[in-house]
Image (cartoon, coloured by chain):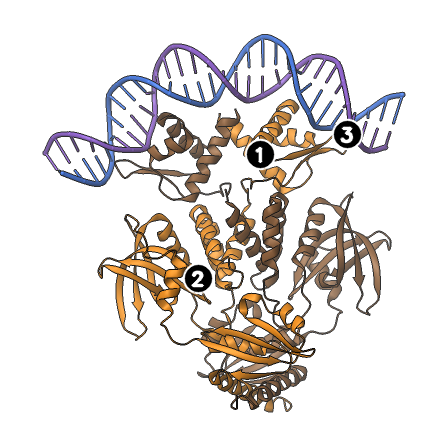
Chain colours: A brown, B orange, C purple, D blue
Amino acid sequence: MTTTSSRLLELLALLQARRDWPGGELVDRLEVSRRTVRRDVERLRELGYPVESLPGPAGGYRLRAGTAMPPLLLDDDEAIAIAVGLRTAARASITGIEETAVRALVKLEQVLPAHLRRRVRALGAATMTPPGGGPTVDPQALTVIATACRDAERVRFGYRGRDGRRSRREVEPHSLVNLGRRWYLAAWDPARGDWRTFRLDRLERPASTGIRFEPRDLPAADAAAYVADSISAAPSRYEARVTVHAAADAVRRQVPSRWGTVEPIDDERCEYRTGDDDLEWLALRIAMLGVEFEVHEPPELVAHLRAMGRRVQRATRHGGRT
Amino acid sequence: MTTTSSRLLELLALLQARRDWPGGELVDRLEVSRRTVRRDVERLRELGYPVESLPGPAGGYRLRAGTAMPPLLLDDDEAIAIAVGLRTAARASITGIEETAVRALVKLEQVLPAHLRRRVRALGAATMTPPGGGPTVDPQALTVIATACRDAERVRFGYRGRDGRRSRREVEPHSLVNLGRRWYLAAWDPARGDWRTFRLDRLERPASTGIRFEPRDLPAADAAAYVADSISAAPSRYEARVTVHAAADAVRRQVPSRWGTVEPIDDERCEYRTGDDDLEWLALRIAMLGVEFEVHEPPELVAHLRAMGRRVQRATRHGGRT
DNA sequence: CGTATCTAGGCCAGCATCTGTCCTCGATTT
DNA sequence: AAATCGAGGACAGATGCTGGCCTAGATACG
């Protein structure tokens, strides 16, 4: 019976929307007898979703956290919030959950009603470009590729190679990998008969072809290793060494561990080592510490910071007058 | 029957995990006859979740986006990604969905299994403190308060007033409001018999008491208006006026509209107006534009930037030597 | 301290539903 | 043209669901 199942879902939705639900109210909402409400609660419990119940007046039912995730029943706004949140989580590249975030995003976008999708897109446009204005991955492209990976569908896109040359590709995507603030696609290129990795920010108009393929095995333990391997030859990676005039603990609190290591020198200073392949971003990360510091390496970073400092100085020279 | 309902949920989970499912595979997974799979699909359609079906070999079933959100069936990792994503979305304060993100977060955390909650907390610790090191809201506190608002439960916390005085409070929370990079709680303070607003970053150890109360009506159209009103007297708000040496369009692309207005001056320059009550943050936002600029107002910002510029200059003076 | 209010859960009767099997039909791929 | 796969009607047997009635236990309130 479809009414029983949908009533169970409705009950779950109610129990998720608010914490406490007196039985009487559930009777009104679900339009069944008191006895059936009790039975529905029992059914939820059988399904593994623990529903607490408190007797007496002011008692009622309450959905507790169990051992497994129950189905999430979201209203429109919540679905949008989750989509937007996942997009930023996929981009942020700090927590180490980017790949999972993309997977969840794909799952959500597959069933996201059209009108909500529009709203998400509109909100996405209002998001700040990450500092440095560096290459950004279009979240749209990200989900297109991730979906194609999941469903084993060929994708087509234009690619700007490292040397600036453009080419059209049609490949069998294997997996998406997030490495050091960048997204890479590991894929089999049938035209070349070999595996290739592509930087997502160099893709142009990626589109799913709808052509299914039989997934192949990557010639590596896992995709992340493969990509790391194949781009290790790539240049442009900066390792910064900075002396910070603040206690190591204080700096550690401010900087996530993924972004480098902090070692105390004495009570008032510490050495901060961090790497990135985007100078602008690296410079900002250090400048925003908000305390005195000295940069030792690399020279490019020193030059970059110097230029930034000069720019700020110039900007404030006139300042007093206006 | 619990088996029918749970089988429907399982089917939904499968259809969300991958896009295409041949009927035969579903038969294996669900351990029912082919006919029943067809009937289950039919049931899902009746519930409003459009399932596409393709006849012929290589055909199968596929869950499409419909007009309503279906229940989301998440695995552990995805649930974590969503929790983390929502936390950042709640903090980011740029997209205008912070309040909804918190609502969704409360819903999710209510049913999040304990072991997942631990993992989320561990990941949360790895997140970067927003630049400026300014006052940050503990996501934990945020959800505690939001939950209490939703469930009409009194909360207890210590509060550091603007003058630095500490006090213990026990209030009836009404709603959480996000305003200009800060979170506020509008609540009825029974001890004082009046409405108060509290800045969340000034709360200490907020905790739910479990004592329910009867919600009152705020003496204002909506909570946001009330909070905006009651803090409008508060000082320390800076309005920046900056001339940026870049085309207005380019700047607009980089800066979300919520963070101020950009007006062209000529083809190569524009005026950027933006406000915040955190100087450090304001300074960074401007410095990270990455192009030449001049700051006209306010003088505090000029001073702040000047100090920052000097700090960077000092930091790079030694740089060449090492 | 007693009473009212709430949930728990067994039992029953009647009814509706679900399942697997068997069937034909139509669409699609090879 | 043949094979594969989904659609969906019919049927019989088994199963499950619902509401009503009951008693028991816990809690809040006067």
Quarter of the view holding residue B137: bottom left
Task: Please name the amino acid that badge 3 sits on.
Answer: Gly
- Describe the element under mark 2 as helix, strand or loop: strand
Chain ID at mark 1 = B
Whole-angstrom CA distance, mark 2 to mark 3, is 54 Å
Whole-angstrom CA distance, mark 1 to mark 2, is 35 Å
Looking at this view, is D5 or A246 the one in front? D5
Count of numbered marks: 3
Which residue was labeled with disc 3? Answer: B56
- Describe the element under mark 1 as helix, strand or loop: loop
- First along the sequence among labels 2 and 3: 3
Q: Nearer the viewer, mark 3 or mark 1?
A: 1
Residue at image location 58% in from the left, 36% down from the top: B12
Look at the picture and state if A54 lies above or below B226.
above
Residue A203: x and y in percent read 75, 60
Residue at image location 73% in from the left, 51% down from the top: A174
- Describe the element under mark 3 as helix, strand or loop: loop
Residue A235: x and y in percent read 74, 73
Look at the picture and state if A250 lies above or below B314.
above
- First along the sequence among labels 1 and 2: 1
Please tell me the numbered disc located at residue B178: 2
Residue B297: x and y in percent read 51, 83
Looking at this view, is B78 or C6 the one in front? C6
Answer left or right for A270 relative to A304.
left
Which residue was labeled with disc 1? Answer: B48
- First along the sequence among labels 3 and 1: 1
Q: Nearer the viewer, mark 2 or mark 3?
A: 2
Look at the picture and state if A36 lies above or below B174.
above
Task: Please name the amino acid that badge 1 sits on.
Answer: Gly
Task: Determine if marks 1 and 2 fall on one subunit.
Answer: yes
Answer left or right for D28 relative to B282.
left
